[in-house]
Image: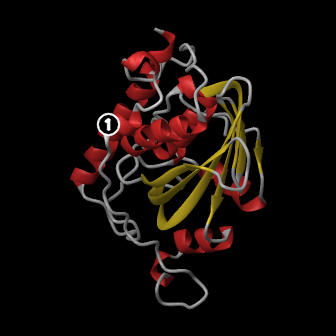
């Protein structure tokens, strides 16, 4: 990948051979991907879909350019409050695929890893996910965001991934599956210092389903696509619970 630019995320390490190989076929940021809105359909795109994809890419780059990665960090708060706030922001921004992160919750030493890659820094993470996921079709539908019952100083997010990835001239479809994101919270700062993503299906299933989507639902060794996620309704009072001084918001206790 010699065409990296300011919008590209830097990967520290590819954790398996397949991912390292496929990374060579990532579409450059200035390439317009022709795609459609079907999770598992790799058919020919329409002119409307092409225009929509171009607009989505421009919009996502604009969003990233407006993120202040040097913003003042959020004050330390109870892990239950942080989980509630992250739940609402993740549901609205879907930053696991859009890259539209809120840096105030992340420690400067933040690191990310999943079964495929390792990345250092929240800005590199944001650029990386924005680059890999097609911004017209990809979704990170949040199911729950809760303090872990088994791991200390950890918040676990359960979510459904769907859409397409920007690999190859036409992209590859993502068979919808469930992801589990573990945020490790630094005891002193109260900020996210580490993120690890886990998947409910093996990597070979994800790869085969992307390369040969017509096999999904027809062969027994591939899992079915994850069920659709129901829309959720948030209580604003619950989201700001725990803020000081009755002012609401993350910075209430600082005012």
Disc 1: CA contacts within 10 A as few (<14), some (14-19) or many (>=20):
few
Q: Position of residue 28 (x, y in %)?
A: 52, 40
Side of 236 relative to 131 (left or right): left
Q: Position of residue 231 (x, y in %)?
A: 30, 57
Quadrant holding the N terminus: top right
Which residue, given by chain and number where applicable, does mark 1 sit on?
236
Side of 209 relative to 194 (left or right): left
Vertical side of 18 occupied by 74: above or below: above
SS of the residue under disc 1: helix
Q: Quadrant of residue 57?
A: top left
Vertical side of 83 occupied by 120: above or below: above
User: What residue is rendered at 69% in x and 52% in y?
Assistant: 114
Side of 125 relative to 141 (left or right): right
User: What residue is rendered at 37% in x and 68% in y?
Assistant: 228
Residue 161 in sight here: yes
Q: Nearer the viewer, residue 31 or 136?
A: 136
User: What residue is rendered at 48% in x and 54% in y?
Assistant: 144
Q: Position of residue 36 (x, y in %)?
A: 32, 59
- Residue lying at the far left of the rendered structure: 48
Residue 28 in sight here: no
Q: Nearer the viewer, residue 230 or 207?
A: 230
The colour scheme applied to this rendered structure is secondary structure
- Residue lying at the far front of the rendered structure: 245
Vertical side of 72 occupied by 21: above or below: below
Numbered marks: total: 1
User: What residue is rendered at 62% in x and 28% in y?
Assistant: 106
Q: Position of residue 54 (x, y in %)?
A: 33, 40
Q: Nearer the viewer, residue 122 or 169?
A: 122
């Amino acid at each position: 990948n010699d065409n990296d630019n300011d919008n590209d995320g830097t990967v520290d390490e590819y954790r398996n051979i397949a991912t390292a190989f496929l990374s060579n076929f990532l579409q450059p940021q200035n390439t317009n991907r022709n795609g459609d809105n079907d999770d598992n359909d790799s058919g020919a795109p329409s002119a409307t879909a092409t225009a929509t994809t171009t607009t989505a890419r421009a919009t996502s780059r604009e969003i990233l350019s407006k993120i202040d990665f040097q913003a003042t960090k959020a004050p330390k708060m109870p892990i239950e409050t942080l989980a509630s706030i992250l739940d609402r922001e993740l549901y609205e921004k879907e930053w696991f695929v859009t890259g539209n992160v809120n840096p105030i919750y992340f420690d400067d030493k933040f690191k990310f890893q999943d079964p495929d890659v390792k990345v250092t820094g929240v800005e590199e993470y944001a650029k990386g996910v924005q680059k890999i996921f097609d911004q017209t079709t990809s979704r990170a539908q949040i199911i729950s965001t809760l303090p872990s019952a088994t791991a200390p100083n950890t918040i676990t997010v359960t979510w459904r991934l769907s859409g397409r990835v920007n690999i190859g001239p036409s992209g590859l479809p993502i068979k919808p599956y469930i992801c589990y994101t573990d945020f490790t919270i630094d005891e002193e700062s109260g900020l996210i210092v580490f993120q690890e993503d886990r998947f409910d299906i093996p990597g070979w299933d994800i790869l085969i389903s992307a390369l040969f989507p017509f096999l999904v639902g027809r062969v027994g060794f591939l899992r079915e696509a994850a069920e659709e996620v129901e829309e959720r309704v948030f209580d604003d009072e619950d989201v700001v619970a725990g803020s000081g001084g009755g002012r609401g918001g993350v910075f209430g206790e600082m005012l």
